[in-house]
Structure formats: C-alpha cells, structure tokens
Image (cartoon, helix red, strand yellow):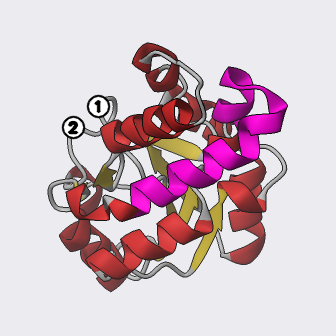
Amino acid sequence: MVKTGTIIFDLDGTLIDAVELHALSFQHAFREAGVEVDMKSIRDRAGMKGEEIVARLASPDKAKEIYQRKSEWFLENLDKVNELPGATRVLETLRQQGHHLAMATSGNRRVLEAVCRKFGWTFGFSVTGDEVTRGKPDPEMLLKVKTALPGPYVFVGDTEYDRQAGETAGIRTLLLGGELKSLDDLTGMKLF
C-alpha cells in the first residue's frame, strides 16, 4: 500500500511550459511603460513573485501598471501555454493513489485559475503570489499549505527558489531537471 500525503506543486516550469511566455509578457509590459529591460534580467528572476520582479526593474510609480499589463498580456496569450508532458495524467494518478494535491505558485490567482480551467485541473488547496507577503524563496506559501492539508509533504518545483522555500519549510523538495527527470517519476517513487 502506498503511504499517502500532500504533494505541493509549483506551476510554471513544473506543470506548464510558460516560463518563456512569462518573460515575453514582462518584456511587453515594460516596453509599453517605456522601460527597457533585457530578457536576461527577467529570466534570471524566474520563480520570484511578479510584483517583486517589477519592483526590482522599474520605478515604483510604474510598477503596478506594469504588473497589471503583464498579467493581461499573459492571459491574452494563454493559448500558447502547454502542459509539460504527462502533467494531467500524473496529477490524476497521484490523486487516485490517495494523495492530496496542492499548488504554491508565485503567479497570481487570475492566471492560476485560467490555467486550471484550460487543463481541467483541481487542487485541494492553492496559494498564489498575490496572497502572501513574501514570495519564494521565503517559505510562507508552503507554510500556508501545511496549515490547510495533512502531512507528510513533498514539494515539486523547478528552480533554486523552490528548493530554498521547501527546505526552509522543512519539506522534502524534488526539482524537475534534478531529482526528477520527468513528472512521470513521481508516480513510481516512494514519496513519503
């Protein structure tokens, strides 16, 4: 019998292939606001809360407008977002095994809900970057999940920010491209 627990997922780069679309969305929004930012500066911050990325790269008087436009542009281009190979199948298999599924994403609630509608995904609990004071690598998101769903816990992500957040929260953390070669690895390994 499989020991069950809560598996917490990051979204971008973990379940969906949208990191580049996020970078393009930021670049588009910065340009519309008259702020030139190179793509490397944006990509280097992948995994951070969007508001934090904007705050570090633009003046405070333009930050809110830039972040709003970035989110709008991303949603307008949601048709370009694909799930990573096997994401839906793996989520369903883990659910059938009796695991609780949670989401902890630096993205905002509107984007998460649109992505979940597109792919037909549901999570027992989710927390987004616009619902916390501090984004990853701070563990605040993961600690919120721990208060909502039963342990033990595993966090699945793809960035060093994810690893730091998981370790600080005291949660076993598995990274795609690291411990996990693909999402399919989750269905056959001892998680807890």
| SS for callout 2 | loop
Q: Which residues are magenta?
A: 52-75
The residue depicted at 51 percent of the width and 42 percent of the height is 173
134 relative to 157 in the view: left or right: right
The amino acid marked with disc number 1 is: Gly
Q: Is residue 58 above or below residue 97?
A: above
172 relative to 179 in the view: left or right: right
Q: Is residue 135 above or below residue 111?
A: above
| SS for callout 1 | loop
The residue depicted at 40 percent of the width and 82 percent of the height is 98
Q: Is residue 87 above or below residue 17?
A: below
| Residue 116 painted magenta | no
Q: In which quadrant of the rendered image does the N terminus lie?
A: bottom left
Front residue of 138 and 179: 138
Q: Main secondary structure of the magenta part?
A: helix
The answer to whether residue 72 is visible is yes
User: Mark 2 to mark 1: distance in Å?
Assistant: 5 Å
- Where is residue 76 drawn, in percent x and y? 36, 63
Determine which quarter of the picture holds residue 178: top left
Residue assigned mark 1 = 177
The residue depicted at 52 percent of the width and 48 percent of the height is 70
The answer to whether residue 102 is visible is no
> Which numbered circle lies on residue 181?
2
Label 2, residues with CA under 10 Å away: few <14, some 14-19, many ≥20 = few
Front residue of 40 and 6: 40
The amino acid marked with disc number 2 is: Lys
- Where is residue 34 drawn, in percent x and y? 58, 27
- Where is residue 143 drawn, in percent x and y? 76, 56
Residues tagged 2 and 1 counted as in contact (Cβ below 8 A): yes
Determine which quarter of the picture holds residue 51: top right
